[in-house]
Amino acid sequence: MLNARIKKEFKTKGRVSFSLDASFTVRRGITVLFGPSGSGKTTILRSIAGLVGPDEGRIELDDHVFFDSSTGSNLPIQRRRVGFVFQDYLLFPHLTAVQNVAYGIRSATSQERCGRAIELLNLLGIAHASGRRPHQLSGGEQQRVALARALGSDPAILLLDEPLSALDAATRLRLLGEIVELQRKSKIPFVYVTHSPADAIRVGDSALILNAGRIVMEGNPSEVFNAPRDSAVLEAVGSENILVGRIQDHNENEGISTIDLAGCELVIPYTALAKATPVTIGIRSDDIIVSRERIGQTSARNMLEGTIKQIVQDGQQVELMTACGVNLKVRVTPQAVAALELGPGVKVYLLIKASSCHLLS
Ligand code: ADP
Ligand code: MG
């Protein structure tokens, strides 16, 4: 378990241009650190790794104190046992894949190091490329080498800073699954930084939401993204609902597929993906229509029944946080709230056209 309290200010021309003040705990599994660009995600990772010195605070992994401003302790980078995977791989260009991985391994003999490096390349499914240099590897292969290298140092925690952002969509999706598997095998906690809500929901066992240097919400990713607590969280996570499910059935004639969302079903436009394939669906909160009554005849393919849990007002826009088998946020106007007498506990029906359900991955 990692416990951190980090305060850090950056100054530009003598004035504070950014202030980070974050306290959080990282437990088992994959913790997603999500936030818009410039919110302080990289600064947090660099502070944990020891690449940035906080002004104040304490960082502790299990019983090892990495940093404590009150006692002046500051463990050097190499003694923290932190693995780091960067956005842009940062492999040594003159070394082969296996040499890159062996570089970080601390075993006694070079033979042992090489053996362990091959083992790791095998684990990542790229042993065939072990003799190639970075420029002879695809982006996905380079990132796999970077992952193998980070694991080679036998870290007690792995930090991944937007590791897939330089890759094409298909490779990203595959690596996303591999990263989850890798975490399950290695059993060490991963902190996964991203600004993609879909990736966050797909890999995260829990999520920390960062906005302007502050943690504004933490918890289960689908709760955090689809039922944000207040307007600061809403601002950070955006107005799209992100749902994870599996393909349940197809009706090619009608041009639709059905998704099992573990809580309810959703009809989306037809997709050729095989049954049981995991998928991520995006629905914009202003594409959902709310009704107080069950509507008999409607062209909308989906009608979900549930209740309003909370209302979050953000300027002239109101977002209803509903529980309809799954959490869904629904954007309405203040006039609609008044006219329909919407409020916490009120029963509602949500109408969603199949064409408003976008297959994200
Ligand atoms: P993120 O990774 O969420 O995009 P960063 O942690 O990289 O955010 O940066 C947060 C803010 O701190 C940004 O405004 C960035 O410009 C600023 N910043 C980062 N590093 C430094 C530095 N060494 N000196 C001054 N400002 C910095
Ligand atoms: Mg960053």
Image (cartoon, rainbow, N blue to C red):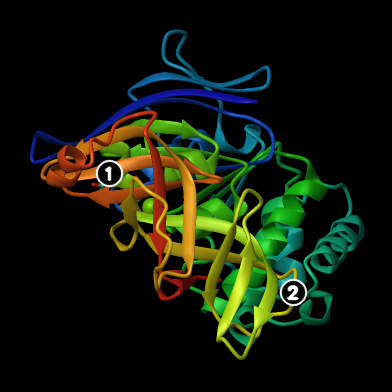
Q: How many residues crowd mark 2 within 10 Å: few (<14), some (14–19), many (20+)?
A: some
Q: Which mark is residue 319?
A: 1
Horizontal and vertical percent position of residue 211:
30, 39
Q: Which residue carries the number 2 mark?
A: 275
Looking at the image, can residue 185 be seen?
A: yes
Q: Residue at x 59, y 56 (%)?
A: 202
Where 257 sits versus 342, above or below? Answer: below
Horizontal and vertical percent position of residue 264:
60, 53
**Front residue of 196 and 135:** 196
Q: Secondary structure at mark 2?
A: loop
Q: Residue furthest front?
A: 296
Q: Secondary structure at mark 1?
A: strand
Q: Residue at x 52, y 58 (%)?
A: 199
Horizontal and vertical percent position of residue 350:
40, 53
User: In what quadrant of the picture does the N terminus appear?
Assistant: top right
**Front residue of 162 and 350:** 350
Horizontal and vertical percent position of residue 20:
30, 32
Q: Can you tell which quarter of the image residue 70 is in? A: top left
Q: Residue at x 74, y 74 (%)?
A: 275
Q: Amino acid at mark 1?
A: Glu
Q: Can you tell which quarter of the image residue 176 is in? A: bottom right
3D distance between C-alphas at marks 2 and 1: 33 Å
Question: In this image, 305 relative to 284: left or right?
Answer: right
Looking at the image, can residue 213 be seen?
A: no
Q: Which mark is residue 162?
A: none
Where 121 sits versus 308, above or below? Answer: below
User: In what quadrant of the picture does the C terminus appear?
Assistant: bottom right
Q: Is mark 1 within 8 Å of ligand 1?
A: no
